[in-house]
Image: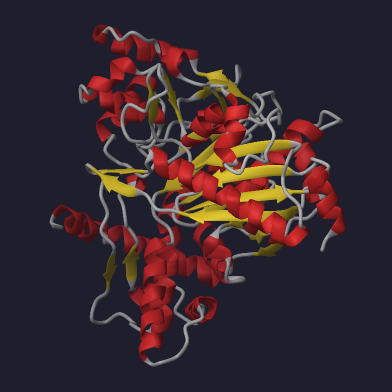
């Protein structure tokens, strides 16, 4: 037993971070040195209801309560104690989406997640109105699409927020949101560190004929930066998290953030000229900019770090889901042969074998579109593998093509940043499931964006650790350091991870693959158009 960790928990000095991912809710407890000392988790899946991806309110609370109960059980098992009080709590979740509530705190329509692509008309009209790229998944796109659809619930909105903002509100009573997550609701003014007043005014003017009982800022959460007071755990909130009743109220809770912001924190990528790539169910890259881009790009979202610095974000709806499905097929084959299936070994063998393939995948092309992919203009998806009779169809090339596909769309967006806008970065860090097999995903991504990629051991802790660190920043920043300095000096202390640089051969091969990929996109478009 770790006696020091037990003392940290019993003295109330541990910090709790909870993140709601797409397929898992994860809780991480960290000690006074910001090291994880206990974890809990709960697996969950979204549902397609009336054509829209959602999670029910019941699933949300059942999930977080099971996750916390798992954390409690692990603390009991490992340290023979219980969690009574904490130094701080942080809540993070998948960004964007649409959670609209009436004045009785009742949700008006099922939670519409980031994954939905039904907002094309709204996003296009708002992008033109604001002269600013407004993605399909942003909250303002969902709101305006509901207005365009004449949905009855819109006039009854009292509060509009994200999943992280909802949980925070329910456990603290505070209608606030961290600036990084807020920047996925409505664009942020880099000078005021608040919603763009110009865009708020344009939106209110646009919707004036509807005579709603609210103006936009009436229903949006207040924007907070990392380290600002975001309220305290209420007695009701404590019961909602810990149904056993052990957790005490009064604990400070840091501003709630989106998974992009916590990913930046977990990879020490909040300083200008740094960046990170998250690659799991979806993928996104975050490059912290020194200056604004020369113009808006449909493929690039402008968001912020948790302390308000501008970030160029390339978000892709699809990453490893189709790749995982193919690996599952090989597991089934192994089981047919009567060989016990060790999934870690299967991934390791297949991924490493992919590196023996041709740099351009021998002409093979894979589209991993489980859902729509806005960056390439597809409102719906259909996974598809494309080859011609003369292509080099072997296992290594097959797996390499699927690995390339997992970051192919990410490459298309980042080529704009690095080739057209000449953005400079000093360090890019990768994290997420794609990098679990040592060195492979890292090498593939390095080739894709022609930049060295670092992976840190701690990056595997993910966003739950990231939001716990923001909790630490709230209560332990005695020297009033900036967030970037706090991470550099207090958390990472010079650790930049293991770096892999791209080879000329891999870069040329990926470039050839992506040209083939783009040339074959009409096949994917036709497959979507005619799918049943």
Task: Decide if residue 238 is on the left or right side of residue 510.
Answer: right
Q: Position of residue 373 (x, y in %)?
A: 33, 49
Q: Total marks drawn?
A: 0
Who is closer to the viewer here, 443 or 460? 460
Q: Position of residue 440 (x, y in %)?
A: 56, 71
Task: Decide if residue 452 is on the left or right side of residue 163.
Answer: right
Q: Which quadrant of the structure image shows residue 473?
A: top right
Is residue 269 visible in the rendered image? The answer is no
Q: Position of residue 143 (x, y in %)?
A: 33, 25
Q: How is the image coloured?
A: secondary structure
Residue 200's place in the image compared with 50, above or below, is above
Give the residue displayed 32% in from the left and 35% down from the top: 110
Give the residue displayed 82% in from the left and 47% down from the top: 8
Question: Is the C terminus in the top left, top right, bottom left or bottom right quadrant?
Answer: bottom left
Give the residue displayed 83% in from the left and 60% down from the top: 2
Residue 334's place in the image compared with 80, above or below, is below
Question: Is the N terminus in the top left, top right, bottom left or bottom right quadrant?
Answer: bottom right
Who is closer to the viewer here, 356 or 224? 224
Give the residue displayed 34% in from the left and 82% down from the top: 392
Q: Which quadrant of the structure image shows residue 14?
A: top right
Is residue 342 visible in the rendered image? The answer is yes
Q: Which quadrant of the structure image shows residue 103?
A: top left
Residue 274's place in the image compared with 480, above or below, is below
Q: Position of residue 367 (x, y in %)?
A: 32, 62
Who is closer to the viewer here, 479 or 187? 479
């Amino acid at each position: 037993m770790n006696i020091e960790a037990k003392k940290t928990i019993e003295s109330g000095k541990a910090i709790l971070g909870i993140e709601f991912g797409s397929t898992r809710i994860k809780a991480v407890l960290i000690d006074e040195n910001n090291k994880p000392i206990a974890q809990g988790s709960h697996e969950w899946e979204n549902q397609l209801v009336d054509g829209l991806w959602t999670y029910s309110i019941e699933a949300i609370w059942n999930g977080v309560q099971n996750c916390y109960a798992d954390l409690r059980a692990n603390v009991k098992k490992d340290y023979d104690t219980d969690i009574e009080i904490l130094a701080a709590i942080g809540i993070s979740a998948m960004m964007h989406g649409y959670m609209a509530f009436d004045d009785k705190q009742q949700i008006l329509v099922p939670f519409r997640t980031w994954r939905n692509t039904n907002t094309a008309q709204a996003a296009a009209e708002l992008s033109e109105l604001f002269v600013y790229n407004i993605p399909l998944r942003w909250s303002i796109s969902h709101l305006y699409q509901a207005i365009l659809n004449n949905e009855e619930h819109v006039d009854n909105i009292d509060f509009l927020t994200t999943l992280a903002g909802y949980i925070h509100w329910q456990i603290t009573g505070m209608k606030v949101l961290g600036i990084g997550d807020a920047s996925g609701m409505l664009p942020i003014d880099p000078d005021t560190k608040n919603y763009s007043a110009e865009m708020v005014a344009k939106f209110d003017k646009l919707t004036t004929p509807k005579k709603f009982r609210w103006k936009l800022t009436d229903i949006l959460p207040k924007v907070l930066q990392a380290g600002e007071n975001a309220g305290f755990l209420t007695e009701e909130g404590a019961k909602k998290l810990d149904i056993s009743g052990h957790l005490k109220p009064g604990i400070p809770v840091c501003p709630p953030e989106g998974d992009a912001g916590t990913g930046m924190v977990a990879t020490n990528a909040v300083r200008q000229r740094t960046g990170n790539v998250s690659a799991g169910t979806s993928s996104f890259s975050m490059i912290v900019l020194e200056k604004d881009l020369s113009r808006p790009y449909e493929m690039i979202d402008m968001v912020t770090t948790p302390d308000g610095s501008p970030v160029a974000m390339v978000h892709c709806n699809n990453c490893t889901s189709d790749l995982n499905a193919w690996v599952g097929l090989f597991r089934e084959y192994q089981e047919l042969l009567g060989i016990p299936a060790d999934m870690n070994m299967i991934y390791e063998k297949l991924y490493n074998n992919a590196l023996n393939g041709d740099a351009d995948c021998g002409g093979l092309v894979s589209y991993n579109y489980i859902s729509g992919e806005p960056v390439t203009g597809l409102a719906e998806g259909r996974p598809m593998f494309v080859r011609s009779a003369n292509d080099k169809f072997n296992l290594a090339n097959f797996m390499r093509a699927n690995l390339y596909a997992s970051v192919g769309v990410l490459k298309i967006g980042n080529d704009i940043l690095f080739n057209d806008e000449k953005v400079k970065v000093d360090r890019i860090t990768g994290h997420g499931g794609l990098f679990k097999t040592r060195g492979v995903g890292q090498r593939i991504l390095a080739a894709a964006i022609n930049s060295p990629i670092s992976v840190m051991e701690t990056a595997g802790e993910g966003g739950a650790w990231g939001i716990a660190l923001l909790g630490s920043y709230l209560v332990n920043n005695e020297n009033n350091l900036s967030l970037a300095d706090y991470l550099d000096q207090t958390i990472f202390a010079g650790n930049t991870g293991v770096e892999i640089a791209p080879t000329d051969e891999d870069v040329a091969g990926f470039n050839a693959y992506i040209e083939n990929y783009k040339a074959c996109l009409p096949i994917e478009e036709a497959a979507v158009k005619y799918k049943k």
